[in-house]
Image (spheres, rainbow, N blue to C red):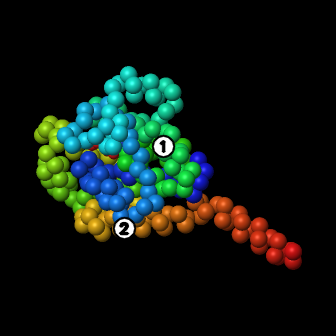
Amino acid sequence: MTGNGILVVVSGFSGAGKGTLVRKLMEKYDNYSLSVSMTTRDKREGEEDGVHYFFVDHRKFEQTIANDGLLEYASYCGNYYGTPREYVEKQIEKGKDVILEIEVQGALQIKKKFPNTLLLFVTPPSGEELINRLRSRNTETEDEILRRVQRADEEVEWIQKYDYLVINDKLDECVDSLHNIIVSAHNTPNRQQDLIEKIKKDLDLISKGE
Ligand code: 5GP
């Protein structure tokens, strides 16, 4: 993918507050585009098709995989989730930073395909806080909550693969630190290859006296 936008993966334990964090980031700063994923899971109350997810059945999901329509996909707690390719590619071309709010298996697939991807992992300040947040949002049964906590316990092992940890304690501060990390990431040498090559060319010419 070309263009000056970067791909930013935001992962984190279920209940870490990634959704709210990313929504606030989009409201406060305007250079971000949020990818809407495709999923086979049931719609939760208040969710809208095409806004929170594209809700599809297994057949449609598998067809999309077969047509190479997904940049990555993974199975999570019994359902498929995947990132539609076209939207992401178009936004990056336009110079937008594209946020993918996805789990760890998908994150690592993206990093392998696009090594300049920035990988961020959101965590609450403690395990107790995680379970409190999961219970208070009232969207899952106790069984589902337990599955998500067990999954979080496995996901801890993957955190070291990420570039930054984002601790979601005070939401507003967290939004700003997320934004600041992304802004800084634009200036790592691997994301500024064109500029470095241009400077090198200029310096070559100057040093030859041309
Ligand atoms: P939820 O069911 O709570 O909306 O999402 C469950 C998990 O799936 C979350 O960790 C979320 O980040 C992840 N997820 C959402 N969309 C995608 C996607 O397109 N690909 C992958 N790999 N994970 C996703």
Find numbered disc 1 in the image and state the secondary structure of the residue it sits on.
helix
Question: Residue 31: image x %, image y %?
Answer: 46, 60
Is disc 2 placed on a helix, strand or loop? helix
Task: Give the label on residue 177, or none.
Answer: 2
* Residue closer to the observer: 105 or 200: 200
Residue 209 falls in image quadrant:
bottom right
- Name the kind of residue labelled 2 in the image: Ser
Any part of residue 196 in sight = yes
Residue 129: image x %, image y %? 18, 57
- Per the rendering, the mark at residue 154 is none
**Eye-nearest disc, 2 or 1:** 1
Q: Estimate the x, y position of residue 184 in percent, counting from the top left.
A: 48, 67
Q: Quadrant of the C terminus?
A: bottom right
Closer to the camera in the image, 41 or 122: 41
Using the rendered image of the protein, determine whether residue 161 is visible from the camera's viewpoint: no
**Residue drawn at the location 41% of the way across and 50% of the way down:** 34
Other-residue count near label 2 (Cα within 10 Å), few / some / many at <14 / 14–19 / ≥20: some
Asked if the beta carbon under badge 2 is closer than 8 A to the nearest atom of ligand 1, the reply is no
**Residue drawn at x 53%, y 45% as measured from the top left:** 89
Q: Is residue 113 left or right of residue 140?
A: right
Residue depicted at x 77% and y 67%: 201
Seen in the picture, residue 6 relative to 176 is either above or below; the reply is: above
Q: What is the distance, in whole Å, between disc 2 and disc 1 at their CAs?
A: 26 Å
The residue to which callout 1 is attached is 87
Dot 1 amino acid type: Tyr
The residue lying at 61 percent from left, 51 percent from top is 2
Disc 1 crowd, CA 10 A, few/some/many (<14, 14-19, 20+): some
Q: Quadrant of ligand 1?
A: top left
Q: Position of residue 157 (x, y in %)?
A: 34, 48
